[in-house]
Image: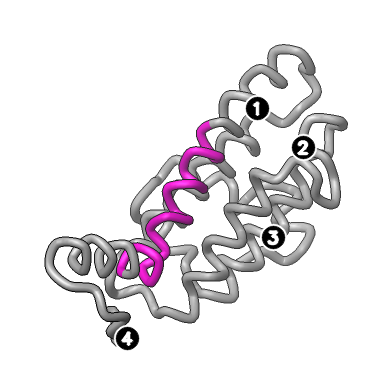
């Protein structure tokens, strides 16, 4: 809720307060991350075609888990301190200039998998995410996730 009155009135105030609410709820960032995630999925699909050595299952699992993380970030029962970590995780995954560029080697997704697994473990979201999407169960059995002692 917008607690500061900046002196606007009428419909202008309503529109402005609505924008403040979007910012407070992280809605604008979430929408931007959703768009980025969809673009990342498209780029990943093209990369799988161009490079058979990329781990397609891990890439798809990361996409599915990130989608669930964005949904969780929107939910009213999600603890507010968790939201920045959920959003930063998705941002890290879709960033092509992270520790290990996703499409440049066969291990391109492993740094992303580590970040996702550690955040999920820290926030204790493994069971919730699996319950919502059974297709991601394999992610937690993946070699890269087991290597870090995943959640």
Give me the residue at 77% from left, 17% from top.
52
Q: Of the numbered discs in the image, which one, if any, rests on residue 4?
A: 4
Considering the numbered disc 3 on the image, is that residue within a helix, a strand or a loop?
helix
18 or 93, which lies in front? 18
Considering the numbered disc 2 on the image, is that residue within a helix, a strand or a loop?
loop
Label 3 crowding class (10 Å Cα cut-off): few <14, some 14-19, many 20+?
A: some
Label 4 crowding class (10 Å Cα cut-off): few <14, some 14-19, many 20+?
A: few
Main secondary structure of the magenta stretch: helix
Q: Position of residue 137 (x, y in %)?
A: 50, 48
Give me the residue at 67% from left, 47% from top.
142
For disc 3, the marked residue is 115
87 or 31, which lies in front? 31
User: Does the residue at mark 1 contact the one at mark 2 (Cβ under 8 Å)?
Assistant: yes
In the rendered image, residue 35 lying in the magenta stretch gets the answer yes
For disc 1, the marked residue is 44
Q: Position of residue 141 (x, y in %)?
A: 62, 50
Give me the residue at 29% from left, 86% from top.
3
Q: Is 106 above or below relative to 64? A: above
Q: Position of residue 99 (x, y in %)?
A: 85, 52
For disc 2, the marked residue is 102
User: Does the residue at mark 4 contact the one at mark 1 (Cβ under 8 Å)?
Assistant: no
81 or 137, which lies in front? 81
Where, quadrant-wise, is the C terminus in this rendering? bottom right
| Magenta range | 21-38
* Circle 4 or circle 3, nearest the eye: 4
Q: Earlier in the sequence, mark 4 or mark 2?
A: 4
* Circle 4 or circle 2, nearest the eye: 4
Q: Is 71 above or below relative to 61? A: below
Give left or right: position of 59 versus 21.
right
User: Does the residue at mark 4 contact the one at mark 2 (Cβ under 8 Å)?
Assistant: no
In the rendered image, residue 11 lying in the magenta stretch gets the answer no
């Amino acid at each position: 809720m917008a607690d500061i009155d900046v002196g606007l009135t009428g419909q202008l105030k309503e529109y402005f307060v609505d924008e403040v609410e979007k910012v407070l709820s992280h809605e604008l960032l979430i929408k931007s991350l959703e768009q980025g995630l969809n673009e990342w999925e498209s780029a990943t699909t093209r990369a799988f075609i161009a490079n058979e050595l990329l781990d397609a299952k891990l890439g798809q699992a990361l996409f599915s888990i990130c989608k669930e993380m964005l949904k969780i970030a929107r939910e009213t029962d999600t603890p507010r301190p968790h939201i920045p970590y959920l959003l930063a995780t998705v941002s890290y995954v879709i960033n092509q200039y992270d520790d290990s560029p996703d499409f440049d080697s066969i291990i391109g997704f492993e740094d992303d998998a580590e970040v996702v697994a550690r955040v999920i473990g820290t926030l204790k979201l493994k069971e919730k995410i699996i319950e919502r999407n059974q297709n991601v169960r394999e992610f937690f059995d993946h070699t890269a996730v087991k290597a870090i002692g995943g959640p």
